[in-house]
Amino acid sequence: MNSPFAISFMRLSELNMLIRNKLSDAFKNNTFWIVAELSNVNYYSAKNYYFFDLVEKEEGNQLIVAKISASAFGSGSQRIQSFEQVTGQKISGNIQVLIQVSVDYHVVYGLKLLVKDIDPSFTLGNLERQRQHTLLRLLKEYPDSIQLINGEYITPNKRLKLPRVIQKIAILSSENAAGYTDFVNSLMINNFGYQFYLYPYFTTVQGENNTTLLVDRMKDVIQSEDQYDILVIIRGGGSQSDLLLFDQYEIASAIAFFPIPIITGIGHHKDISIADLMANKSTNTPTKVAEMIIEHNHIFE
């Protein structure tokens, strides 16, 4: 048997340097615009670095067909921050982007892509396309229940009449949200001495991955032995990506068919979510929701 020391070999570092040199020659000074979805986004503010995965999923399902690590620093980080200012949203998982990258290989950390630029107009257009797709899906799947009439979406929830006096209020909100505190204070400390009975159902009210949590809490409201006059869904302000939760089909349909009138106040000033369009009434902040309820009761007098 031949001695293993007679076999020609190289050190791992030598192989990795060979890979690096080959890739450097192949991709030297080249950049590429690619479409991919963000995943596992991490930001390190101390050094202004971003680390995330870029993934491609098979159309029609969630099967990942391609994945690679990426990072941004220096001008790349500046381009991401410019993107966030233009789009009004922080980069986060499940957002599809058109991003310019170069190929980098490190002998210790392996293969990754370096961010050079990111196109905000692509993401804004894609989000609007997804939004319109959801609205059309709701109209198509429930033609007898959800209708678009003179520019307004008419839903079963919107057809419900508010009680003449609102007193028992179920609340979907984050427990620690400033918006929840604003709502409670504005409602309970009113100029007319009106009394209200509040029943909070705390949950996460941001991030599109929390759709199931919010829908489940809505089911808890329905299954409660208490009979509520209305359900309010409130949250404080936030980035555009935080509001993506309220453009999700499952939440929109749950609101549209909810058996108790819903008033939304989810902390936006410029954009109307699909949840707003499906609800009985909507306004832009939790404080405005409280004012709407007080005014409703005052009119009854």
Image: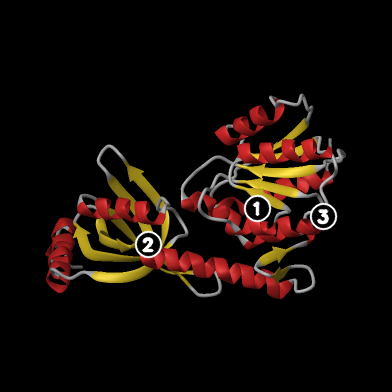
Q: Quadrant of the N terminus?
A: bottom left
Q: Are marks 1 and 2 in contact (CB under 8 Å)?
A: no
Residue at horizontal 72%, vertical 73%? 141
Instruction: State the image quarter where residue 251 is shown.
Output: bottom right
Q: Nearer the viewer, residue 85 or 36?
A: 85
Residue at horizontal 73%, vertical 49%? 262
SS under mark 2: strand
**In this rendering, does residue 259 appear at all?**
yes
Cα distance in 3D space between marks 1 and 2: 25 Å
Q: Nearer the viewer, residue 104 or 50?
A: 50
Residue at horizontal 30%, vertical 39%? 45
Q: In the rendered structure, which disc, 1 or 2, sits on the residue that comes first in sequence?
A: 2
Q: Vertically, is 88 above or below 232?
A: below
Q: Nearer the observer, disc 1 or disc 3?
A: 3
Residue 222, image x and y in percent?
A: 81, 47
Q: Nearer the observer, disc 2 or disc 3?
A: 3
Residue type pointed to by label 2? Leu
SS under mark 1: helix
Q: Are marks 1 and 3 in contact (CB under 8 Å)?
A: no
Residue type pointed to by label 3? Leu
User: Which residue does the numbered mark 1 point to in the structure image?
Assistant: 212
